[in-house]
Image: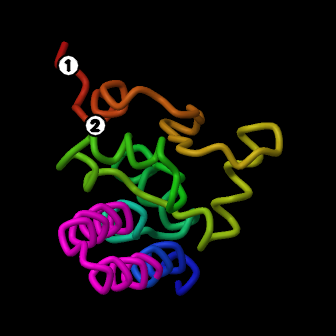
Amino acid sequence: MMRVWILPMLLLLCGSAVATGLVLTGSPGAAAALLSALLLFAGTNSPLVFPRSIGALEARRRSAADGRPVVFWRPGCAYCLRLRVRLGRDAGRLHWVDIRRDPDGAAVVRAANDGDETVPTVVVGGRPHVNPDPAWVRAQLSPPPAP
């Protein structure tokens, strides 16, 4: 759990130190801009942006029960962040697995990607899809049309 907070905390601590130096040299505007940018960057790389992660086994069980896709991701991944942001509120309807926290999830991703941990990997109906288009993922959430 603590490992996912290392990058955001380092960004804030280092940014605070540099901002303090800027304030002491007479550049409070630059310090405020730097701190704002680093706060935004730290926030997007923190686990707060993503829905609560669950284990791969639990995600697979839930997906089998409700038919929703499973997203394997890791903090700091720009493509995972892109998927999350473009899904908007629909992201909460997916089952999210952080492969840094779940070794079983990392194994699923490696098996789907020839040994690489390429994320986001979205599993729909037992089939993995690497870095899919967010619109396609959203379409997987909607119920099939009635005949």
Q: What SS does tag 2 mark? A: helix
Q: Amino acid at mark 1?
A: Pro
Mark 1 lies on residue: 145
Give the x, y percent position of residue 86. 27, 38
Find the magenta span and give its range: 14-43
Q: Rate crowding at label 2 as few (under 14), some (14 to 19) or many (20 or more) other CA atoms within 10 Å.
A: some
**Picture colour scheme:** rainbow
* Near-viewer residue (69 or 51): 51
Separation of marks 1 and 2 at Cα, in angstroms: 12 Å
Residue at x 21% of width, y 45% of height: 88
- The percent coordinates of residue 82 (x first, y second) are 38, 41
CB atoms at circles 1 and 2 under 8 Å apart? no
The spot of residue 98 in percent (x, y) is 53, 64
> Image check: 116 left or right of 82?
right
- Of the pair 133 and 68, the residue shown nearer to us: 133
Q: From the viewer's perspective, is 52 left or right of 117?
A: left
Residue 141: mark: 2
Q: State the residue lying farthest toward the top.
A: 147
Quarter holding the C terminus is: top left
Assess whether residue 2 is covered by the magenta stretch: no
Give the farthest residue toward the front. 25
Secondary structure of residue under mark 1:
loop
In the image: residue 26, left or right of residue 52 = left
